[in-house]
Amino acid sequence: AEYMGFAQKELGDIVFVDITAVGKPLAANEIFGTVEAVKTVSDLYLPISGTITEVNGGLESTPENVNKDAYGEGWMVKMTVDNIADVEALLDAAAYEQLVGKKKKK
């Protein structure tokens, strides 16, 4: 979820969300959709293996919720995870922010 904060700064206002991978098993780092922002279109990558079980249909009419309330009304997908240990291995917000900060300095 911390990705969204970084992505919002990089992409700008989200104007369209397209997620078509519902019910399809996906591997980690596979593309599950796209977001269109004022500046560009960007692929969405699943950070862990699993199956998307639900998409936030509200984003069709209010994609700006991704910017306004990423942790609430702007959620994108719900999924079944293949291996719970993969979730535990994800970076927390502080570690992700540190990683992104290092990359931006280069």
Image (tube, rainbow, N blue to C red):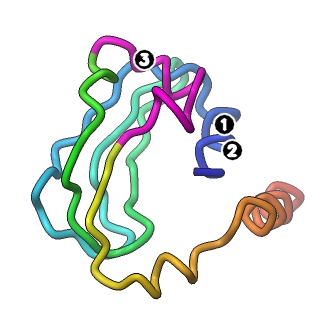
Q: Identify the residue shown where x is 11% and y is 62%.
A: 24
Q: Which residue is mark 2?
A: 6
Vertical placement of residue 67 versus 7, above or below: above
Does the CB distance between marks 1 and 2 fall below 8 Å?
yes
Disc 1 target residue: 10
Gap in Å between the C-alphas at discs 1 and 2? Answer: 6 Å
Q: Earlier in the sequence, mark 3 or mark 1?
A: 1
Q: Which residues are magenta?
A: 61-76
> Residue 8 sits in which quadrant?
top right
**Nearest to the observer: residue 91 or residue 99:** 91
Residue 101: percent from left, percent from top:
84, 58
Amino acid at the residue labelled 1? Glu
The residue beneath circle 3 is: 15
Q: Residues within 10 Å of mark 3 (few under 14, many from 20)?
A: many
For mark 2, give the secondary structure.
helix
Residue at 56% in and 38% down: 71
Give the secondary structure at mark 1: helix
Figure quadrant of the C terminus: bottom right
